[in-house]
Image: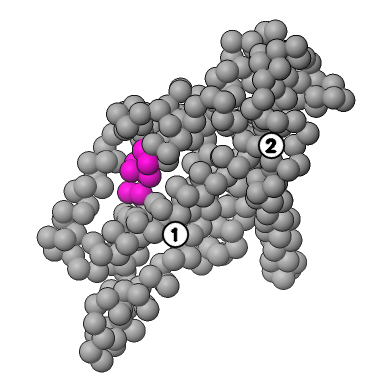
Amino acid sequence: MIEKITNKKNIKIIIYSTLILALFLIALFSNKIVPYDPIKADLTTALLPPSSTHFFGTDNLGRDVFSRVICGIRTSLFSSLIITCFIFIFGMLIGVIAGYYGNIVDDILMKITVILQSFPSLILAIAVAGMLGPSLKNTIIAICIINWTKYARMARSLTISLKESNYIKSSILCGAKSHQIILTDVIPNISPTLLVMAMLDIGGMILEIAGLCFLGLGAQPPTPEWGLMMNEGRKYIYNAPWMILSPGIAILVVVFLFNLLGDEIRDRFDVKQ
């Protein structure tokens, strides 16, 4: 019975991973597979409804919405991946240093995380992005500044627990230096838990990028980005609802897929299970 459940979970992970891999391949070759130029305007074809020629219709400037949605995959996926990698690595290092060395180092680093976590994350991200200026690069920086703290706190807690383990104490008695213990014993043991967090976070990062771009603080026209496309389409929600529905559904599907994979990986590597 247990083997059947395990095999079922493995099959789900393979299916979701395959679909996400397909998304990344589409993102890599998006410019070559789209039927139209995603940024070329043609007012003679403005606001055309979905058809066999334009699958998702056209926007107010006559650009093919399907082509823009496909090209928007690259912006959203790669941006969220960059953010997740940064907050994972930076947050883990800060947490490990704080948890391993303790004392004043721990106090200073944890005070910084507490200060950042005391603000609503989205509002603070809007403030940071607003100060840096509207661009996709600044949006990525703003989200990175806000979201590394939870990784730091989790890494700190795991590191404090590991410090009391016998093999860490044995390494210390054998004369191993602190940085050697951190690199060879601590980080490899806490990484799986943080990787599960990171997988669950990718969908959230896509939503945050789309949210800031929707507010005009991220990617700027004519960049094909889902949040920006929804912002442009809200003015035509009654006349051309496909302008806002197409990128909205794309966000829903991609975030849902990453969340499904994250949940399966979490269940698969849950020690209690």
Q: Which residue is mark 1?
A: 194
Question: Which residues fall within the magenta stretch?
Answer: 141-150
Q: Residue at x 75, y 11 (%)?
A: 44
Q: Nearer the viewer, residue 255 or 48?
A: 48
The reply to whether residue 139 is in sight is: yes
Q: Amino acid at mark 1?
A: Leu
Magenta segment's dominant SS is: helix
The first of marks 2 and 1 along the sequence is 2
Q: Quadrant of the C terminus?
A: bottom right
Q: Which residue is mark 2?
A: 70
Which image quadrant for residue 164? bottom left
Residue 162 picture location, percent across and down:
33, 72
Which image quadrant for residue 167? bottom left
- Quick one: SS at disc 2? helix
Residue at the extreme right: 52
- Quick one: SS at disc 1? helix
| 133 with respect to 59 (left or right) | left
Number of numbered callouts drawn: 2
The reply to whether residue 120 is in sight is: no
Residue 47 picture location, percent across and down:
72, 13
Question: Would you place residue 251 above or below residue 108 in this image?
Answer: above
Question: Would you place residue 119 above or below residue 269 in this image?
Answer: above
| 258 with respect to 18 (left or right) | left
Q: Amino acid at mark 2?
A: Ile
Question: Would you place residue 82 above or below residue 218 in this image?
Answer: below
Q: Residue at x 41, y 36 (%)?
A: 139
